[in-house]
Amino acid sequence: MDREHVQSFFTELRDIHQIGVPVKETSYYPCLSNLFNATGKKLRPRVLCVIHPRSVGAGLPDGALVTPDQKSSEDDPLAAGLIPARGVLEIKSPGEDAADVVATEQVRKYLAKYGLVLVTNFRQFILLSRGANNLPVVLETFTIAPSEKAFWKAVQTPHTLTERLGTSFLEFLTRVMLHAAPLTNPHRGGNRTYIG
């Protein structure tokens, strides 16, 4: 697998952080979106990461993982009622613990509506599926660094970090994007129904 996208991800995070003006999490969203899109374009069907998709009744996710055949009659890939085929993203800052975010009401709402949620703080990734009573079921996790301090230290040398984790991180991201979100309601207006 090509690890240059992972190294670019780490390099972009480092560079934005070093400038000293980023907002805690949103300034880093493009880094994550770029990584997902570079990895997702090699899949069949291709998977696209959309930052801040339209809400479909459970709040506004930070991101959505969609496939190109998800289109409405208006050619809006996230039209009203359309559930992202590969789930949604809940993104927090590296200073927060992703495991704490898993237990929040917001994540529970996302699971109830979307079926799959990837919770991340850029250093921890937790893929969740909807369980009984919409409780989160952890499908898989990946950790780049155990703390915010360790994370920012690690990304100071993107090449070294990529050499150590690049292949396994790409494999994890690929598995995330290959999961199909289980749906609770059928689409209308020509949209497809995806069964997990």
Image: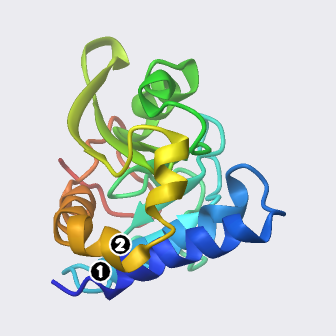
Residue 111's image quarter? Answer: top left
- Is 146 placed left or right of 130 in the picture? right
- Is 139 placed left or right of 188 in the picture? left
Q: Position of residue 131 (x, y in %)?
A: 25, 22
How far apart are the two marked residues, 1 and 2, measured between alpha carbons? 6 Å
Q: For the point 49% across and 34% down, which residue is it?
A: 110
Q: For the point 22% across and 87% down, which residue is it?
A: 2
| Amino acid at dot 1 | Arg
Tell me if residue 131 can be seen: yes
Read off the residue under disc 1. Answer: 46
CB contact under 8 Å: marks 1 and 2 = yes
Q: Using the image as rendered, state which of residue 71 and residue 110 is in the foreground.
A: 110
Q: Secondary structure at mark 2?
A: loop
**Other-residue count near label 1 (Cα within 10 Å), few / some / many at <14 / 14–19 / ≥20:** some
Is residue 182 positioned above or below 132 on the image?
below
Q: Position of residue 85 (x, y in %)?
A: 34, 58
Q: Position of residue 41 (x, y in %)?
A: 32, 85
- Is 120 placed left or right of 5 in the picture? right
Q: Using the image as rendered, state which of residue 27 and residue 133 is in the foreground.
A: 27
Residue 67 shows which numbered tag?
2
**Other-residue count near label 2 (Cα within 10 Å), few / some / many at <14 / 14–19 / ≥20:** many
Is residue 14 positioned above or below 187 on the image?
below
Q: Secondary structure at mark 1?
A: loop
Q: For the point 84% across and 63% down, which residue is it?
A: 21
